[in-house]
Amino acid sequence: MTSNGKPKIAFFDFACCEGCQLTVIDALQNHLDLLNAVEIVQFREAMSERGDDYQIAFIEGSCARPTEEKRLQAIREQAKLVFALGACAHLGGVNSLRNWKRQADVEKYVYGDWNRDLDSYLARPIEAVIPIDGFIPGCPIDRDEFANIVKLLLQGRELRLPDYPVCVECKLKENACVYLRGEACLGPITRAGCDAICPTYNDGCEGCRGQISNPNFDGIKQAVREHGLKETDFVDKLRLFQSYQLIESEK
Ligand code: SF4
Ligand code: SF4
Ligand code: SF4
């Protein structure tokens, strides 16, 4: 706590596009009450001051190099509460797509003959390296969900994310199901809270918010078959954000 009783918060970025931090900045502009209730001591994307005394840490991005583990452990030791911010930190996210390839091939593809030791390894979610106290899902995160979660946190109240599928929100919006036009959608197994934004704009859900706690895989596989799709269409969708989990489940 600061001398004025405000909790100190820090934001950290690892391998990511930093879109979730941008969403935080956006959220704070519309939630000045929240901004006034905390002291932000570290937030590279928004300020140049840098304090190492904090109680709550938000970590954006996946861990993509062994050298980053030390930095993560230092954050864990300092913070009372650590939250993964966005799909890269929560799931491994789009970074883990490269985990299907040999790392040397990926480095060669991206950097050509640039001769430098990149020190990369399989991209992984933060929880694969340090224990976390929670996560804020999405790619990017939802600005209002972020603000609400931080408010609950400051009030010492229980954090609850929706644990029902995107299909519920999609049906409430009376969207035509994308399966009916022969496209796959991960809505039946994906955690709601995004207001089914992708199906609302005629795209199948890619699962950026991760899975609900009791996903019905048999049901979604049946839906895939019944609509003339292959199981690979469904697995390809899962790969975008959940390659780390798919590869781990095959071990
Ligand atoms: S979750 Fe998406 S928006 Fe957030 S940092 Fe990762 S790629 Fe960017
Ligand atoms: S479009 Fe996707 S989210 Fe919407 S009802 Fe169909 S399967 Fe569920
Ligand atoms: S519909 Fe699916 S992919 Fe789109 S934002 Fe929601 S959870 Fe993410």
Image (spheres, rainbow, N blue to C red):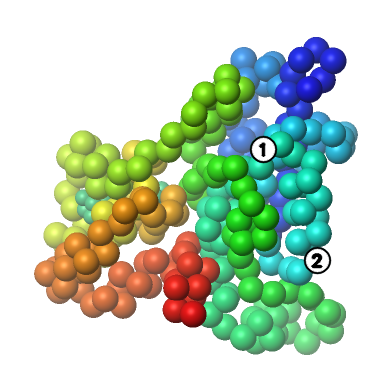
Quadrant in which the N terminus appears: top right
The residue at the point 76 percent across, 28 percent down is: 8
Q: Is residue 49 left or right of residue 173?
A: right
The residue at the point 37 percent across, 72 percent down is: 236
Count of numbered badges drawn on the protein: 2
Residue nearest the viewer, comparing 247 with 178? 247
In percent of width and height, residue 186 lies at 31, 59
> In the figure, residue 58 lies in which quadrant?
top right
Looking at the picture, does residue 208 appear above or below residue 251?
above
Q: Is residue 2 left or right of residue 105?
A: right
Question: Sequence-wise, which precedes: disc 1 or disc 2?
Answer: 2
> In the figure, residue 45 lies in which quadrant?
top right
The residue at the point 30 percent across, 43 percent down is: 164
Checking the image for residue 150, the label placed there is none
Residue nearest the viewer, comparing 17 with 235? 235
**Amino acid type of the residue tagged 1 in the rendering:** Leu
Disc 2 designates what residue?
67
In percent of width and height, residue 17 lies at 64, 55
Q: Is residue 243 visible?
A: no
Q: Residues within 10 Å of mark 2 (few under 14, many from 20)?
A: few
The residue at the point 49 percent across, 80 percent down is: 251
Q: Is residue 103 visible?
A: yes
Q: Residues within 10 Å of mark 1 (few under 14, many from 20)?
A: some
In percent of width and height, residue 21 lies at 65, 42
In percent of width and height, residue 153 lies at 58, 27
The kind of secondary structure element at disc 2 is helix
Disc 1 designates what residue?
81
Tell me how far mark 1 sits from mark 2, CA to CA.
22 Å
Task: Decide if ligand 1 comes within 8 Å of the CB at mark 2.
Answer: no
Looking at the picture, does residue 243 appear above or below residue 133?
below
**Amino acid type of the residue tagged 2 in the rendering:** Thr
